[in-house]
Amino acid sequence: MVMDGNNWLPGVKSVLAIYQSKGDAWSVAFVMSAYFVVLLLFWCMQLYVRTTPYSAQRWKLKEAVWSLSTFLTAMSSYKVANLMPWPVALVVWGMSAAVSFGAFYEFFLHRKD
């Protein structure tokens, strides 16, 4: 990964979020796992771009990218939905499901690799 002027920013924001959690173990675990999932997602996307089209490794990386992005979407939706009244929480979860199913359709059913 090439280091430019903005690559340190997500790490600093994660450290600040952990600091501001004031010892809440669940918040610290959420921030750390979300940061780890984002790093894995970017790594898998970088490997995906470098692989040859129609290879088995490319298909597995596509599965990993979809799984990680769906997991990250669900994690974020969980945190946001907890702050909202239940009708808005349903909308948040519905949008999360729509994004995940739309990405699944685009990645696996609409074959244009």
Image (tube, rainbow, N blue to C red):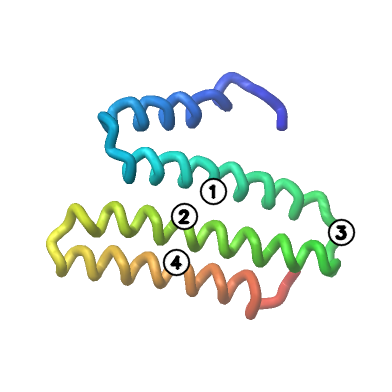
Q: Quadrant of the C terminus?
A: bottom right
Q: In the image, is 47 to the left or to the right of 30?
A: right
**Rendering quarter of residue 111:** bottom right
**Kind of residue at badge 2:** Leu
- Using a 10 Å C-alpha cutoff, classify the residue at mark 2 as few (fewer than 14 neighbours), some (14 to 19) or many (20 or more): some
Find residue 41 and report its horizontal and vertical position in percent. Answer: 60, 50
Disc 3, SS: loop
Kindly report the distance in space between the C-alpha atoms of the residues bearing marks 1 and 4: 17 Å
| Residue position for label 2 | 72
Q: Are marks 3 and 4 in contact (CB under 8 Å)?
A: no
The answer to whether 13 is drawn above or below residue 59 in the figure is above
Question: What is the crowding at mark 3: few (fewer than 14 residues within 10 Å), some, or many (at least 20)?
Answer: few
Q: Earlier in the sequence, mark 1 or mark 4?
A: 1
What label does residue 99 carry, if any?
Answer: 4
Q: Which residue is mark 1?
A: 37
Eye-nearest disc, 4 or 2: 2
SS at mark 1 in the image: helix
Q: Earlier in the sequence, mark 3 or mark 2?
A: 3
Q: Answer yes or no: do the residues labelled 1 and 4 have beta carbons within 8 Å? A: no
Which numbered marker is on residue 58?
none
